[in-house]
Every structure is written in C-alpha cells, then in structure tokens.
C-alpha cells in the first residue's frame, strides 16, 4: 500500500503512524490501536472500521461565527484533485481503512445542475483511482443540502417544489457516485429538514414529502445496483430549531411509519444524542434493540455547551459503553466509526490532525478491549438478566408471552408479595470503574 498516490507529499515529516504499545511516549504512535491484533475472533481493524471525515479534516478551516479561518491546508483547497491526494495520503498514513464525504466536500459547489453533475463525475473518477491505489474504501457519502441558500427553508421538506426537485439532482448524482465507488452506506442528515416556526409550517405535509424523497431515493438506488444501507442521522436541532429526525426513537418511528425499516438504519452521532438530552449509549441501544444501528459518527460534545462542538472522542466511559453495545449486537455490519470531529480552531500545527485521530482511535481501541472483557466476564449482563428473572418462568413468563389477560394478572396481584430489591447502582458504577481502570 503506497502512502500517497500523487506526485507530492503533503504531510511532510510525518510517516505512517505505527503501534508502539502503551509504554510508548511517542505522540505520533498508537498506544492501543494495533490494527491486526485480535480481540475475540476479529482483529481491531475489523471491529472498529475507522473512517476519516472529509469535511472536517480537509475542508473546515477554523472559521466560526466570530472569526476568520485559522487553519491553513498544505494543499490548494480549490483544486479537488490536490485535496484528494492529500486526503488519501492522510488516510494511508493514519490507517483509517474508510472515508466519508458530502458531495461539496470533494469539489466546490456549482449552481448549474448539469455542470454540477459533470464536475462531480470527474472528481468521482479521480476518487475511484485513489481508492484503487490505496485500498481505502468508501464507508458512506451524502449530499450537502443545508449550506446553499436555496435550502434555507429545507431541502426535501421545502415548501417550494422546485427546491425539492433541485435537491433531487444532488441525491441522484451522489447515489450514482456511491455505486461507482462501492460505497457501503448512503447517509441522509436533514440539517434543514425541520422548522423554525409553526406559524409558517405545515409539519404533516413536510414530513410526508421527506418520506416520499426517501422512498424514491431508495427505489432509484436499488435500481442502479446499490446494495448497502441507507442511514438517517438523527439530530434534534442546529441549524434548524426543530429537526424532524430528532433522535433515534423518533427516527425509527418515522421509518417504520413509512415502511422503510428494512432498507434504512441509523447513523448515531454522540454529540447529537447528547444534544437531544440522551446519552450516546441510550441512542445506540434504542437503535440496536430495533435492529437499526447502522453506523456511528464518533465524536463528543462539551458538557457545558449546548451546541454541536464535534470534538474528537476521549471519554472512556462513553466509548466503552458504546463498544459494549456494538459487541453485544455482533459488530457494525456495513457501518463503522466515522470521526465526524474537528480539531479545535486554535490547533494549527500540521500534526494536530494526526494527533486528534490517534487519540480517537486509541480511545476506541482501549474501549473495545475493556468492553470485550466486560462482555466475556458477563457480570453486568448476568446482573440485568437476574433482575428480570421473575419473567423467565411461571406466571411472569406467561404474561411476557402475551398469554395472560388483565383479569388473571390482577388476580395474581391480589395475593402477590412485593418486596424491595435494590437496583445496586453504586455497586455497578464501582464495578464499571474497576474494569475501566483495571483494578
Ligand atoms: C452535522 C453532521 C453532518 C452529517 C453529515 O451535525 O453531523 O456532518 O454527519 O451530513
Ligand atoms: Co455527523
């Protein structure tokens, strides 16, 4: 595998990032992520399926509502092929086997729909060549239908049909590119699919239009040979005040209502789950329980801020809980761990992007190892199982299986002896810490 496919090396002075083990003090080495090391019956690379996000790593320049760009790239940002060369150099040096992008991350957006299609195709051909040269694969692509001013009132949920139709240009072309690049999933994140005021919004109609768009996108993609999963990425708000894909439970209900549950699953982003007032683990488990946990946008928010800070993940408690849920469902399937995360605005050294990914990959590798041990030991799963054991036999079992009516249940209740049973939360917290910190 070559480290870079272009003529030029962009990240000079930084070589392939290698595993050196936990005693290493080399900041540009992995302490836990050892791609070929087995955890249970799979290698770490097979379990974790890391992906680099194009938009944060090669597009976001540090500008925010208060300030200008701070981050300068080692490539000409207006040249999509130079950008792609730098991106694939980065993927191969850091060792993320997958990547993900929006259409307008890989080339500058074009107003004219036909010119947009033509340019996207040229760039897609270039991406395919780089995928082949490097072995890096497409975890998912998506269409950015939230940045352009035409989408200020929504894309598929826009009250103006012409805007809905223009958004279809992007979806259709992105699906064609996905099939060409062998994408495993296709993502819909509806940043503007929601409302700011009910005084100007027909919510029912907008949601029905959104479902129509998902249905016809699914049908078209299947007709051109897409065999992967469609993923909806829930987020409660930001940029819209109220987004229709609020959280995992809302999204799953929506998909089931329109009969989309077999083709679609969720892409759960940690910082979106916390914005919805949940934990990362909560939204993961809601999806997993429904058989609809497709993939993860790995990041974390800031406990004191009420917005999407998209920080690289470092919180071992959250990460270990996440990996436990993924292991319990037997892995990611077609999904993976996509670092939808950005370096801070004042992290301006070229190596900072590498350090950020190393931290995230090491944290998930460590979380995987701990979660594997927790699963093997079975302490928590046995505790939970025992807690519900009164439903495993006799009357409790008949109730759970739907073989008991309310009259019989109440009759049993008249003589039932209820007792206090401790939930043992402190014991469980202490046990979890003992796994995390190995004591
Ligand atoms: C926005 C977000 C998006 C999606 C893809 O909060 O997470 O980048 O992941 O559109
Ligand atoms: Co995301």
Image (spheres, rainbow, N blue to C red):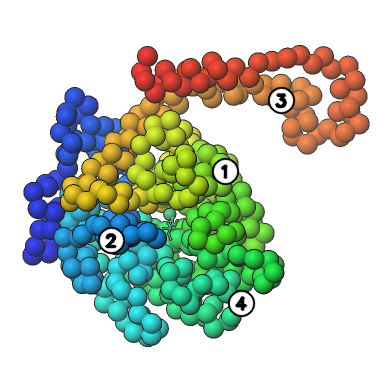
* 21 displayed left or right of 361: left
Q: Residue at left 17%, top 39%? A: 28
Residue pointed to by mark 1: 277
Q: Disc 2, disc 1: CB below 8 Å? A: no
Q: Earlier in the sequence, mark 2 or mark 1?
A: 2
Q: Earlier in the sequence, mark 3 or mark 2?
A: 2
Residue pointed to by mark 3: 391
Q: Which label is found at residue 159?
A: 4
- Indicate which label's residue lies in the foreground, 2 or 1: 2
Distance between mark 2 and mark 1 Cα atoms: 31 Å
Distance between mark 2 and mark 4 Cα atoms: 34 Å
* 151 displayed left or right of 81: right
**Of helix, strand and loop, which one carries label 1?**
loop
**Of helix, strand and loop, which one carries label 2?**
loop
Sort mark 1 into few (<14), some (14-19) or many (20+) by Cα contacts within 10 Å: few
Q: Earlier in the sequence, mark 2 or mark 4?
A: 2
- Indicate which label's residue lies in the foreground, 2 or 4: 2
Is the residue 116 above or below the residue 318 in the image?
Answer: below
- Indicate which label's residue lies in the foreground, 3 or 1: 1
Q: Earlier in the sequence, mark 3 or mark 4?
A: 4
Q: Disc 1, disc 4: CB below 8 Å? A: no
Distance between mark 3 and mark 4 Cα atoms: 50 Å
- Indicate which label's residue lies in the foreground, 3 or 2: 2
Give the x, y percent position of residue 423. 63, 19
Give the x, y percent position of residue 300. 41, 43
Residue pointed to by mark 2: 69
Distance between mark 3 and mark 2 Cα atoms: 59 Å
Sort mark 4 into few (<14), some (14-19) or many (20+) by Cα contacts within 10 Å: some
């Amino acid at each position: 595998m070559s480290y870079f496919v272009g003529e030029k090396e962009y990240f000079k002075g930084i070589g392939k990032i290698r595993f050196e083990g936990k005693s290493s003090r080399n900041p540009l080495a992995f302490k836990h992520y050892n791609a070929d090391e087995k955890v249970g019956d799979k290698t770490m690379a097979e379990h974790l399926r890391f992906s680099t996000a194009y938009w944060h790593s090669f597009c976001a320049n540090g500008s925010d509502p208060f300030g200008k760009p701070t981050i300068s790239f080692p490539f000409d940002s207006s040249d999509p092929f130079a950008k792609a060369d730098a991106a694939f150099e980065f993927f191969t040096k850091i060792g993320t086997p997958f990547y993900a992008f929006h259409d307008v991350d890989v080339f500058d957006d074009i107003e004219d729909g036909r010119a947009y299609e033509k340019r996207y195709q040229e760039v897609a051909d270039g991406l395919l060549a780089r995928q082949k040269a490097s072995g890096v694969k497409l975890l998912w692509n998506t269409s950015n239908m939230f940045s352009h001013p035409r989408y200020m009132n929504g894309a598929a949920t826009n009250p103006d049909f012409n805007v809905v139709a223009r958004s279809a240009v992007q979806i259709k072309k992105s699906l064609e590119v996905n099939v060409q690049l062998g994408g495993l999933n296709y993502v819909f994140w509806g940043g503007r699919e929601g409302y700011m005021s009910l005084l100007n919004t027909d919510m029912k109609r907008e949601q029905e239009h959104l479902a129509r768009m998902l249905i016809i996108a699914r049908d078209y993609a299947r007709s051109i040979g897409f065999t992967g999963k469609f993923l909806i990425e829930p987020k409660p708000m930001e940029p819209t005040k109220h987004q229709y894909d609020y959280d995992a439970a809302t999204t799953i209900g929506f998909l089931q209502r329109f009969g989309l549950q077999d083709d679609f699953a969720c892409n759960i982003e940690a910082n979106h789950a916390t914005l919805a007032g949940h934990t990362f683990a909560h939204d993961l488990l809601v999806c997993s329980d429904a058989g609809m946990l497709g993939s993860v946008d790995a990041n974390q928010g800031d406990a004191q801020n009420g917005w999407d800070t998209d920080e690289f993940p470092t919180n071992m408690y959250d990460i270990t809980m996440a990996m436990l849920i993924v292991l319990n469902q037997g892995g990611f399937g077609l999904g993976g761990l996509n670092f939808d995360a950005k370096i801070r605005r004042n992290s301006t050294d070229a190596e900072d992007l590498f350090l950020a990914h190393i931290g995230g990959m090491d944290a998930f590798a460590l979380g995987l190892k701990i979660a594997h041990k927790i699963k093997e030991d079975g302490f928590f799963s046995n505790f939970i199982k025992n807690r519900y054991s009164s439903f495993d036999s006799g009357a409790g079992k008949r109730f759970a299986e739907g073989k008991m009516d309310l009259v019989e249940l109440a009759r049993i209740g008249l003589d039932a002896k209820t007792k206090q049973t401790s939930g043992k939360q402190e014991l469980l917290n202490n046990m979890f810490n003992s796994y995390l910190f190995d004591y």
